[in-house]
Image (cartoon, helix red, strand yellow):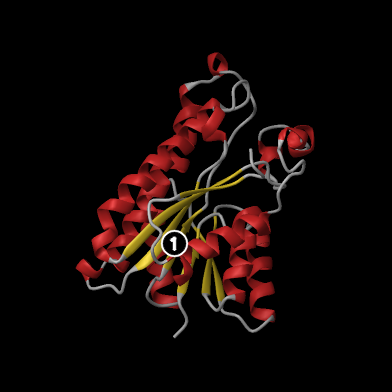
Amino acid sequence: MKPVILITGGSRGIGAATALLAAARGYAVAVNYRRNQTAALAVVDKITQTGGEAIAVAADVAVESDVLRLFETVDAQLGPLTALVNNAGILEQQMRVEQMDAGRLHRIFTTNVIGCFLCAREAIRRMSTTHGGAGGAIVNVSSGAVHMGSPGEYVDYAASKGALDTMTAGLAREVAADGIRVNGVRPGFIYTDIHADGGEPDRVNRLKNNVPLKRGGQPEEVAAAILWLLSEEASYTTGALLDVAGGK
């Protein structure tokens, strides 16, 4: 039986790259998406056309009932969960803190923090040896923004990822005896569509000269780090936060 991986926000960018690499490594893949069914199905098609196994599942991780249905669908269609990648996350238009309203803050923290907690909870209920599971691994996709806080752009997004890092540290220690490893990756300036969501599609090119390696990163480079953390090669690694940011 293939190991089973669930990737939230798996229809584009880092999530899609992770889905494709996971399939190549022998995982049965659940590609979660919120709205972009076309993109999610395209990822699934790429996997199945090369002999892999994958499904696309619509769910908003910010909605608890959606999360419950998401995990139940994976259970029914792919089998026992082996790995979770908490990749779903949002940011909004670049602005200073004094311009932000409570609605924006609620949206950012509900998706980027509470959504990750809900998905981790459901994964633990299935993977924990205490609950009859066989163990597993979780990778939380954070951001290099935690280091400087994204001033003048999205301090709220950076703060939500800082909360995710704290969750990673605490949860790793909480479930270590349950056979579950929990780690995080902190991507730097990566060429993905998320920058367009913030109002600056070309943001990576503007900032890449500030990176010691003098370039932006590719989603596949982050995916490789995620798959390493999920693998047996990282069997003694838990509670780690791996920067994939070109030295930034």
Q: In the displayed structure, does residue 146 sit left or right of residue 213?
A: left
- Name the residue: 59% across, 18% down: 96
Q: In the displayed structure, does residue 136 sit left or right of residue 233?
A: left
Count residues near mark 1 (Cα–Cα under 10 Å), then give few for <14, some for 14-19, many for 20+. Answer: many
- Name the residue: 51% across, 56% down: 8
* Residue 14 visible at all: yes
- 229 vs 99, nearest the viewer: 229
The image shows residue 76, relative to residue 13, as above or below, that is: below
Quarter occupied by the N terminus: bottom left
Q: Position of residue 149 (x, y in %)?
A: 54, 27
**Would you identify the image quadrant in which residue 162 lies?**
top left
| Residue marked by disc 1 | 84
The amino acid pointed to by label 1 is Leu
Q: Position of residue 235 (x, y in %)?
A: 40, 67
Quarter occupied by the C terminus: top right
Find numbered disc 1 in the image and state the secondary structure of the residue it sits on. Answer: strand
Q: Position of residue 56 (x, y in %)?
A: 56, 67
Residue reaching furthest to the left? 130
Q: Position of residue 238 (x, y in %)?
A: 38, 56
- 233 vs 155, nearest the viewer: 233
- 47 vs 141, nearest the viewer: 141
- Name the residue: 39% across, 55% down: 119
**Would you identify the image quadrant in which residue 46 lies?**
bottom right
* Residue 157 visible at all: no
**Would you identify the image quadrant in which residue 237 lies?**
bottom left
